[in-house]
Amino acid sequence: MSDDQITKRMGKLLRQGAALLNTACPQCNTPLLRLKDGSMYCAKCDREIVEQKIPQTIADQRMVSGDILTQLASKALASLEILTQSLPEKPHKEEIRAFASTAKELIEILRGIQELQSR
Ligand SMILES: [Zn+2]
């Protein structure tokens, strides 16, 4: 799955009420989402993550997720830039719609990251 698809999936889940966790996936280091049913989910691995496999110490978690969040934020920003640049001068309705929804998802992710980092 491409980064773009992962970003989109995360954006969709965030809109549905999932929360971005300050914990990364033990498999791929992608920030995990807490779904509405309380389970933890990795958008990249596309699977539920069992709590025991998460790094135990708070120090570890902060170190890992700090980096991950910064990486994710820069990827989301880069995607937003590419998206903006790829929009033609006189876009069609469909292009505007696609642009708006993807941009919204990316902005939601950035907002989520900001929230976590301001804690
Ligand atoms: Zn993963």
Image (cartoon, grey):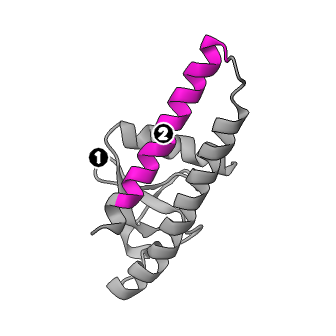
- Of 112 and 92, the residue lying toward us: 92
Find numbered disc 1 in the image and state the secondary structure of the residue it sits on: loop
Main structural element of the magenta stretch: helix, strand or loop? helix
Which callout, 2 or 1, points to the residue nearer the camera? 2
Q: Secondary structure at mark 2?
A: helix
Q: Amino acid at mark 2?
A: Glu
The residue at 36%/67% (across/down) is 117
- Of residues 35 and 52, the one drawn nearer to the viewer in this rendering: 35
Q: Percent position (x, y) of residue 108?
A: 42, 44
Number of residues whose C-alpha sits closer than 10 Å to that of mark 1, classed few (under 14), some (14–19) or many (20 or more): few
Write down the residue under mark 1.
37
Q: Is residue 66 magenta?
A: no
Residue placed under numbered mark 2 in the picture: 105
**Image location of residue 26, percent across then percent down:** 52, 72
Label whose residue precedes the other's in the sequence (2 or 1): 1
87 horizontally vs 70: left or right: right
Q: Quadrant of residue 75?
A: bottom right
Range drawn in magenta? 91-114
Q: Quick one: 18 or 80, which is closer to the camera?
A: 80
* Callout count: 2
Question: Would you say residue 57 is visible in this rendering?
Answer: no
The residue lying at 69 percent from left, 43 percent from top is: 82
Residue type at numbered disc 1:
Asp
Extreme-front residue of the structure: 89
Number of other residues with Cα within 10 Å of mark 2, as a class: few under 14, some 14 to 19, many 20 or more: many
Front-lying residue, 94 or 51:
94
